[in-house]
Amino acid sequence: MLVADHLHPAARKAGITAQVGFHTLRRTLASALVANGNDIRLVQELLRHSNPLITLDAYARSTTPAKIEAQGWVMQQLVTEDSKAALANAKPASTLTM
């Protein structure tokens, strides 16, 4: 399972001793997307919030410079070398066609 096989070991590696679960990953993803300047409507749709105001209320607070720096460190701890290589070779979502 995602949480037991990947998230818990990554959290331990990062020195996180608090309870970590799926919603921790969900909140981290949303915060990282907002902090990196993704459109709030896109984040809202990915999280399946009923409207963008819910997303803004929950995640706009996480975009101060100190919080962005801390989130970047956490993301570096969670990303494996294989996934870093895949991310480096990935095309930005704005270049993909549907």
Image (spheres, grey):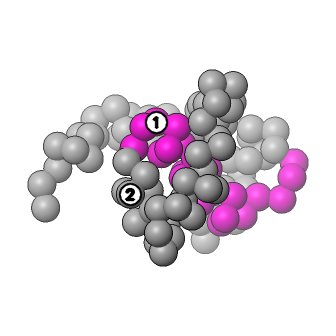
Count the numbered circles shown: 2
Depth check: give the residue in front, 67 or 91.
Answer: 67
Callout 2 crowding tier (Cα within 10 Å): few <14, some 14–19, many ≥20: some
Name the residue rendered at 23%, 40% in the picture: 91
Q: Magenta region: which residues? A: 17-38
In the rendered image, the vertical position of residue 46 relative to residue 36, given as above or below: below
In the rendered image, the vertical position of residue 48 relative to residue 69, given as above or below: below
Circle nearer the viewer, 2 or 1: 2
User: Does the magenta portion include 27?
Assistant: yes
Which percent across, then down, holds residue 81? 49, 34
Name the residue rendered at 46%, 36% in the picture: 36
User: Mark 1 belongs to which amino acid?
Assistant: Asn
In the figure, is residue 22 to the left or right of 33? right
User: Does the magenta portion include 36?
Assistant: yes
According to the picture, the residue beneath numbered tag 1 turns out to be 36
Q: Residue furthest right?
A: 17
User: Mark 2 belongs to which amino acid?
Assistant: Arg
* Tag 1 secondary structure: loop
According to the picture, the residue beneath numbered tag 2 turns out to be 41
In the rendered image, the vertical position of residue 54 relative to residue 57, given as above or below: below
Which percent across, then down, holds residue 30? 54, 52
Callout 1 crowding tier (Cα within 10 Å): few <14, some 14–19, many ≥20: few
Residue 75 in view of the camera: yes
Which percent across, then down, holds residue 48? 47, 72
In the figure, is residue 90 to the left or right of 1? left
Q: Main secondary structure of the magenta part?
A: helix
